[in-house]
Image (cartoon, helix red, strand yellow):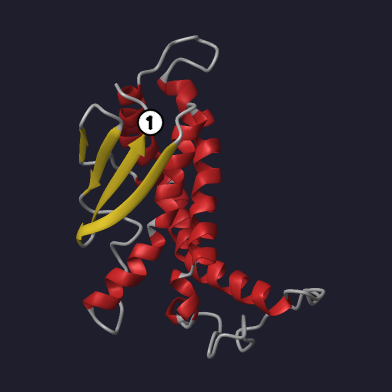
């Protein structure tokens, strides 16, 4: 296994834990609101990770919590992606656009192609499958097999799998928004699962190209 495969596996494992961790943080913050937080406690395989029922290491109790679709959790997940997007843009744009000091003017469509090509390749090992625009600031990016959700499966059936998967998509939405912001483009990004695991990202900007 080469370094690229190791890095990809590490990212997959990290992102898999993003949603349950966000749920646990939100749960813990709501419990400690108005009082000092407890000291750090070492966890064991038989130690509960939060007050969520049956939330032990290796369990899926956190993603079954009612908190999973709360604004606090989704904003926390989206913000993780947003912060990564800003930092990732600095690394990838240097190579794609001959460095930040080149003075090259980048068109909004070039930025979207950068997201589809360079960013997606770095994160998921593949490019976006489709890019559409109305040339009035609206863009639609399609990933026909989004790796982040491709292996998700709920014992409760397809409907529950789709509901859980949608929460994970706030992360790549944040990445895209962070990338665009690094180029000075304010945007709103949302995602929908067109046909599992295909994902459509809808991006609205104020720029007419």
**Residue 150 picture quarter:** bottom left
How many labels, in total? 1
- Identify the residue shown where x is 55% and y is 68%: 21
Where the C terminus falls, by quadrant?
top left
Q: As displayed, is residue 53 above or below residue 175?
A: below
Q: Where is residue 156 in the image (x, y as percent from the top left)?
A: 28, 84
How crowded is the residue under tag 1: few (<14 C-alpha within 10 Å), some, or many (20+)? few
Q: Which of 185 and 193 is in front in this view?
A: 185
Work out which residue is located at the far left of the displayed protein and give it: 195
* Left or right relative to 180: residue 120: left
* Left or right relative to 76: residue 141: left
Q: Which residue is identified by label 1?
A: 206
Q: Position of residue 162 (x, y in %)?
A: 28, 69
- Identify the residue shown where x is 68% and y is 79%: 31
- Identify the residue shown where x is 20% and y is 31%: 134
Is residue 114 visible in the rendered structure shown here?
yes
* Left or right relative to 75: residue 25: right
Helix, strand or loop at mark 1: loop
Q: As displayed, is residue 191 above or below residue 26?
A: above
Q: As displayed, is residue 96 above or below residue 83?
A: above
Q: Position of residue 94 (x, y in %)?
A: 49, 22
Q: Where is residue 165 in the image (x, y as percent from the top left)?
A: 34, 66
Q: Which of 205 and 125 is in front in this view?
A: 205
């Amino acid at each position: 296994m080469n370094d690229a495969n190791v890095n990809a596996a590490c990212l997959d494992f990290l992102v898999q834990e993003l949603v349950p961790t966000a749920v646990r943080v939100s749960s813990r913050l709501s419990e400690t609101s108005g009082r000092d937080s407890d000291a750090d406690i070492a966890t064991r395989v038989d130690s509960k990770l939060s007050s969520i029922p049956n939330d032990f290491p290796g369990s899926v109790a956190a993603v079954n919590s009612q908190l999973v679709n709360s604004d606090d959790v989704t904003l926390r997940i989206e913000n993780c992606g947003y912060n990564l997007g800003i930092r990732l843009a600095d690394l990838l744009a240097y190579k794609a656009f001959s460095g930040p000091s080149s003075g090259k003017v980048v068109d909004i469509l070039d930025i979207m192609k950068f997201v589809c090509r360079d960013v997606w390749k770095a994160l998921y090992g593949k490019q976006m499958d489709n890019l559409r625009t109305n040339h009035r600031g609206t863009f639609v990016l399609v990933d026909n097999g989004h790796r982040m959700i491709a292996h998700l499966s709920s014992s409760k059936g397809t409907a529950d799998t789709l509901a859980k998967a949608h929460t994970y998509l706030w992360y790549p939405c944040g990445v895209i928004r962070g990338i665009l912001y690094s180029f000075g483009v304010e945007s709103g990004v949302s995602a929908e699962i067109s046909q599992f695991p295909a994902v459509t990202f809808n991006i609205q900007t104020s720029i007419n190209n």
